[in-house]
Amino acid sequence: MKISEPKFWWNGNPSILIRLMSFPFGIFLKILIFFRNKLFKKIFLPKPVICVGNFVVGGQGKTPFVRYLRSVLEDIDRKTVVISNGYGGKMKSSKIISDIDSSIDCGDEALLHAKDGLTVVSKSRADALEVLDKNQFDFILLDDGLQDPSIHKDLNIVIVDTSKGIGNNLLIPFGPMRESLGFALKKTDIIIFINSINQNHQSISNVLKLWKGLVLYAEYETYIDEDINEEVIAFSGISNPEKFSYGLKNMGVRVNKHFIFSDHENISEDDAKEIFEYSKFKNLKIVTTEKDLIKLKESKKDSYREKLYFSSILAKVKIRFDEATLINFLKEKKLI
């Protein structure tokens, strides 16, 4: 189920009314989460598990970092498998994902991971390895799952977008928090602050006051393989479309119009026609994200979706990060 994010979630100082309304529900939810974690018997998987999660609902930049982390581990000859719950997809059983799979079935993020290497989609992360030979990999990477009590994790990395932070620090539905910050921090090993639009939400200071562990910083930089120093049309269906607009602006590209869809939304034929025809009318190139382009991959022949797929220029994300500190931390934890 997709959750709409009310604007008040991201206000640093929620109103007194919101605080009063959230208080009894917050206590109930904390008790529920506490017993949920106590009652679940953790499963220990045959290889080290690194979970990349977040404190809040919605995208914070987990998937790009999991892809980056896979590349770091592969560079030191550690084979990896990524386990995704296939958010937005219809697939019910566990399955190894390949290029022939559809985002409608397995979700867009899983297809991105499959481009990089061994990837399994499973609604139950604990059951995901049933389709794998454990000798195929040295590490298990979880894209999301910090709040999943069913699996023992050897390392929990939490991604925090500095432009959104933890919002008003209230639990769903009165705020974006999946669980209380104090509880989440107890199982956190590393916090990575992502600089996406060069803004710091005021809640970042609250996190740093409570967290005394390792903090690392990452810069997400948008880039395009071909030269574009001109006006373009953009379309995206990501959690924070402002990141995409900001990234293009930093490249010196001016966005004439940005067609914005909700996170994980599949672009309809009518939407594709509108974008394609507008680009022709303006005689401007179309730019989109990897996550959005991959959803158009299985378009019908001669449809506007197919035309949009072949006419769109791909914008990718490059991550600037202190890789050496992360590797040393993994060594200290005796994971490598």
Image (cartoon, grey):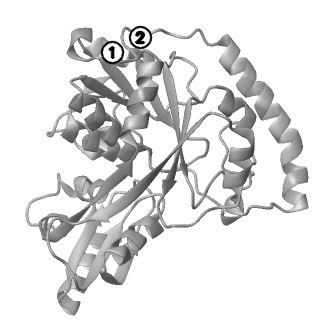
Query: What kind of residue is marked 2?
Result: Leu
**The residue positioned farthest toward the left in the image shown:** 301
Q: Is residue 205 above or below residue 285?
A: above
Task: Estimate how packed mark 1 is, as few (under 14), some (14 to 19) or many (20 or more) residues with alpha carbons within 10 Å.
Answer: many
Along the line of sight, the residue nearer the viewer: 237 or 208: 208
Q: Is residue 28 above or below residue 305?
A: above
Residue under the point 42% across and 72% down: 246
Quarter of image, res 50: top left
Residue under the point 24% across and 27% down: 76
Residue under the point 65% across and 61% down: 201
Residue under the point 17% across and 51% down: 298
Residue 120 position, x and y percent, is 30, 27
Q: Which residue is mark 1?
A: 129
Q: Confirm or deny contact between disc 1 and disc 2 (CB under 8 A).
A: yes
- Say whether disc 1 or disc 2 marks the residue closer to the N-terminus: 2
Residue 161 position, x and y percent, is 54, 54
Quarter of image, res 28: top right
Query: What kind of residue is marked 1?
Result: Leu
Along the line of sight, the residue nearer the viewer: 15 or 295: 15
Q: Which residue is mark 2?
A: 45
Residue 240 position, x and y percent, is 48, 62
Q: Is residue 167 above or below residue 43?
A: below
Q: CA distance from mark 1 to mark 2?
A: 8 Å
